[in-house]
Image (cartoon, rainbow, N blue to C red):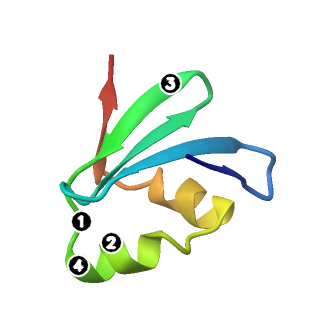
């Protein structure tokens, strides 16, 4: 599990699923999952900062998990 913080102080707890090329994201008391990523996005996402994840959360490339 990775723990990252954005410049605004938003905390992200991230868990990867390498076989599905997805991430589980826990932030602000909610749980989300990314849709499967392309090879290029998957390879680079391991190096994303908290700010990168904050920007990712502004897209529609994930869904909320109950």
Residue 32 in the image, given as x and y percentages of width and height: 39, 35
Image quadrant where one finds the C terminus: top left
Earlier residue among tags 2 and 3: 3
Q: Is residue 4 above or below residue 12?
A: below
State the CA–CA distance, disc 2 to disc 1: 6 Å
Q: Are marks 1 and 4 in contact (CB under 8 Å)?
A: yes
Q: Which residue is mark 4?
A: 39
Q: Which residue is mark 2?
A: 42
Q: Is residue 63 above or below residue 21?
A: above
Query: Within 10 Å of the Cα at label 2, are there few (<14), some (14-19), or many (20+) other Cα atoms?
Result: some
State the CA–CA distance, disc 3 to disc 4: 26 Å
Quick check: 8 left or right of 3? right
**Element assignment for label 3:** strand
Q: Is residue 23 above or below residue 32?
A: below
Of the residues tagged 3 and 4, which is closer to the observer?
4
Q: Which residue is mark 1?
A: 37
In percent of the image, x 44 and y 70: which residue is there?
45
Q: Are marks 2 and 1 in contact (CB under 8 Å)?
A: yes
Q: Which residue is mark 3?
A: 30
Residue 5 in the image, given as x and y percentages of width and height: 74, 51
In percent of the image, x 62 and y 44: which residue is there?
12
State the CA–CA distance, disc 2 to disc 4: 5 Å
State the CA–CA distance, disc 2 to disc 3: 22 Å
Earlier residue among tags 3 and 4: 3
**Element assignment for label 4:** helix
Q: Quadrant of residue 55?
A: bottom right
Quick check: 36 left or right of 11? left
């Amino acid at each position: 599990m990775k723990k990252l913080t954005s410049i605004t102080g938003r905390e992200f707890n991230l868990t990867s699923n390498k076989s599905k090329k997805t991430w589980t994201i826990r932030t602000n008391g909610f749980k989300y999952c990314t849709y499967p990523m392309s090879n290029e996005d998957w390879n680079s996402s391991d190096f994303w900062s908290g700010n990168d994840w904050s920007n990712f959360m502004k897209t529609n490339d994930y869904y909320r998990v109950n």
